[in-house]
C-alpha cells in the first residue's frame, strides 16, 4: 500500500511515462533526474485502461472561449529536468518557475487570497507539505512526517489545509492548521481516500475513494461526518473539484471508455459530459468565476495545460513547453502577472539545502555556515557566500556592517539585498566553519562551483 502511495506522489511523472507509450514523439521529453522512489502498479488513478489506449493524433483544438481567462494558474512541469512548480497567467503568458529544489515539487494549491501556494515536496527526504509565497519566496514546512503527505487543499477561510497521508497504511484525508498544529484525521476507510476539494463555504469536502471497490466521488462535512456518496458507476470517477460558485462539481470519469471531463450538481445529480476525446484528461480546476475549467491533457500528443468553457464549448491550449505539464491549480482571484518572474537558480544535488529554521542566518546564535570573508575578498557585491542567491536567483548586494567575535567564532554582520526585495535583511555569516551550508528562509543556493570555491578558500 505504501508503494502504491509513493506512486500517487509521482502521478504526474508516471502519467507522463504512460503518455510516452502512446506516442513515439514523446520519447524526446526530458525525464526527471532525481526520482528514486519505488514505483507500484497503478490502480486508482490510471485514467485509461491498457486496452483502451488510443494513438494520439494531433488535431486542431483551439476554439473561441466565451471570455478571456483571468487570474493565474499554477502547475507542475518537468521541463527543467525535475518536477517543479510553475505559475502563469490564465491566458498562458508570463510562465515562471517557482521552485528549485533538487527533489520533486508537485500538487500546488492556492490560498484563498491568492498570495501563497501550498504544495508537496520531498526536498527533505520524504514527501511533506510546504507553503511558499506566490512568487516562490519564504518557504515553510507545514507537515513533517516520515509518511507520504501529499495533495494539499487550502480551506476557504485560509486557516487549514486538507491533505492525504498514508501514515496509517492506506490513503486517508487529514486536516491541519497552516501553522502545523491541530492535526486531525477525517477519514478511516478500508480503501484509499484522495484528492480532497473544499466547497466555497468551507462546510464540505468532496473527494475520491475506493472504499467501495472502484473509485467513486463522495462528500463529507469538514469534521469528517455526514458522508454522502455522489457517484455510483462501474467506471472510474476521480479528481473532483468544487466550483467557486458552489453549484457544481467537476470530475474525470471513464464512462465512455476514455478519461473525459464531467460536471454534476453538488448532490450528484444532473451529470453532464463536457469532453468527448479519445485521450487522457486529468485534474480539473475551476476559474474563479466558475465559467472555465483548466485541465491537463495529451490532446496534442505531449501533456499540456488546456482551458475549456464550463459549458463544453470553447477550448484553448495554454502551455507548449519542452517538458510535460500537469496538475493545474487556478488562482482564486483575477490578478495577472504583468511580467514573468525572474528565473530562479537551480539547486544542484548535495550543494546546499534549504532550512526551515526561521533564525538560521538571522541571529548570532545561528549564523549561516561557511563562506568568504568580505574583508579578505574585498568584494562587497558578492559578500560572504557567493553560492547564495535571492529566492528567484537574483544576485545579492552585500554590505559589511560589523565584525564580531562570539564564543571564539569570527562572524560578519551584513546587510543583504536583491532586486524585488522590499527592504534589506540583516544576516550573520560564520567564516570559519566548513559545515555543509544551508540557505536561510527566503534565499536559494547557486552554483556548486562557487560552493567548492568558498569551501577551498575557507580551508586554505
Image: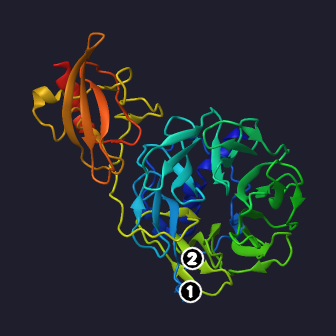
Q: Name the residue at 52% across, 61% down.
A: 75
Which residue was labeled with disc 2?
307
Residue 36 can be seen, yes or no: no
Give the x, y percent position of residue 206.
Answer: 77, 59
Q: In which quadrant of the rendered view does residue 148 lie? A: top right
Q: Name the residue at 72% across, 44% down.
A: 175
Q: Name the residue at 58% across, 88% down.
A: 66
For residue 166, above or below residue 18: above
- Most foreground residue, 18 or 369: 369
Mark on residue 148? none
> Marks 2 and 1: in contact by CB < 8 Å?
yes
Task: Answer with mark 1 or mark 2, whichever residue precedes in sequence.
Answer: 1
Q: In which quadrant of the rendered view does residue 183 lie? A: top right
Residue 9 can be seen, yes or no: yes
Give the x, y percent position of residue 100.
Answer: 40, 48
The kind of secondary structure element at disc 1 is: loop
Q: Give the mark count.
A: 2
For residue 291, above or below residue 407: below
- Quarter holding the N terminus is top right
For residue 334, above or below residue 154: below
Which residue was labeled with disc 1?
65
Q: Is residue 9 left or right of residue 237?
A: left
Q: Residues within 10 Å of mark 1 (few under 14, many from 20)?
A: some
Give the x, y percent position of residue 217.
Answer: 81, 62
- Most foreground residue, 295 or 156: 156
Amino acid at each position: 500500500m505504501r508503494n502504491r502511495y509513493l506512486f500517487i506522489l509521482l502521478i504526474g511523472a508516471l502519467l507522463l511515462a504512460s503518455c510516452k507509450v502512446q506516442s513515439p514523439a514523446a520519447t524526446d521529453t526530458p525525464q526527471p533526474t532525481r526520482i528514486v522512489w519505488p514505483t507500484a502498479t497503478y490502480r486508482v488513478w490510471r485514467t485509461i485502461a491498457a486496452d483502451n489506449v488510443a494513438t494520439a493524433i494531433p488535431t486542431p483544438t483551439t476554439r473561441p472561449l466565451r471570455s478571456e481567462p483571468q487570474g493565474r494558474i499554477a502547475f507542475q512541469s518537468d521541463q527543467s529536468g525535475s518536477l517543479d512548480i510553475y505559475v502563469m497567467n490564465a491566458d498562458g503568458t508570463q510562465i515562471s518557475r517557482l521552485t528549485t529544489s533538487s527533489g520533486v515539487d508537485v500538487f500546488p494549491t492556492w490560498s484563498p487570497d491568492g498570495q501563497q501556494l501550498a504544495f508537496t515536496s520531498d526536498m527533505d527526504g520524504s514527501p511533506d507539505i510546504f507553503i511558499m509565497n506566490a512568487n516562490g519566496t519564504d518557504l515553510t514546512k507545514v507537515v513533517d512526517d516520515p509518511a507520504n503527505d501529499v495533495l494539499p487543499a487550502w480551506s476557504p477561510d485560509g486557516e487549514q489545509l486538507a491533505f492525504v497521508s498514508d501514515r496509517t497504511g492506506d490513503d486517508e484525508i487529514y486536516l491541519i492548521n497552516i501553522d502545523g498544529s491541530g492535526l486531525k484525521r477525517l477519514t478511516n476507510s478500508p480503501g484509499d481516500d484522495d484528492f480532497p476539494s473544499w466547497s466555497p463555504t468551507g462546510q464540505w469536502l468532496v473527494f475520491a475513494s475506493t472504499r467501495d471497490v472502484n473509485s467513486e466521488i463522495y462528500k463529507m462535512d469538514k469534521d469528517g461526518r455526514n458522508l454522502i456518496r455522489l457517484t455510483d458507476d462501474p467506471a472510474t470517477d476521480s479528481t473532483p473539484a468544487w466550483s467557486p460558485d458552489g453549484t457544481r462539481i467537476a470530475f474525470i470519469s471513464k464512462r465512455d471508455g476514455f478519461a473525459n471531463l464531467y460536471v454534476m450538481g453538488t448532490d450528484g445529480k444532473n451529470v453532464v459530459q463536457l469532453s468527448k476525446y479519445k485521450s487522457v484528461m486529468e485534474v480539473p480546476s475551476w476559474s474563479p468565476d466558475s465559467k472555465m475549467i483548466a485541465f491537463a491533457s495529451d490532446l496534442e500528443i505531449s501533456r499540456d495545460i488546456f482551458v475549456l468553457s464550463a459549458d463544453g464549448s470553447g477550448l484553448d491550449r495554454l502551455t507548449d513547453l519542452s517538458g510535460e505539464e500537469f496538475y493545474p491549480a487556478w488562482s482564486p482571484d483575477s490578478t495577472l502577472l504583468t511580467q514573468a518572474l525572474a528565473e530562479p537558480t537551480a539547486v544542484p544535488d548535495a550543494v546546499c539545502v534549504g532550512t526551515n529554521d526561521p533564525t538560521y542566518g538571522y541571529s548570532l546564535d545561528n549564523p549561516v555556515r561557511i563562506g568568504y570573508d568580505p574583508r579578505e575578498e574585498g568584494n562587497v557585491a558578492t559578500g560572504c557566500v557567493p553560492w547564495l542567491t535571492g529566492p528567484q536567483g537574483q544576485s545579492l548586494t552585500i554590505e559589511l556592517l560589523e565584525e564580531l567575535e562570539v564564543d571564539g567564532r569570527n562572524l560578519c554582520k551584513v546587510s543583504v539585498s536583491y532586486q524585488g526585495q522590499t527592504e534589506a535583511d540583516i544576516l550573520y555569516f560564520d567564516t570559519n566553519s566548513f559545515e555543509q551550508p544551508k540557505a536561510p528562509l527566503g534565499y536559494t543556493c547557486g552554483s556548486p562551483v562557487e560552493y567548492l570555491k568558498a569551501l577551498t578558500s575557507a580551508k586554505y
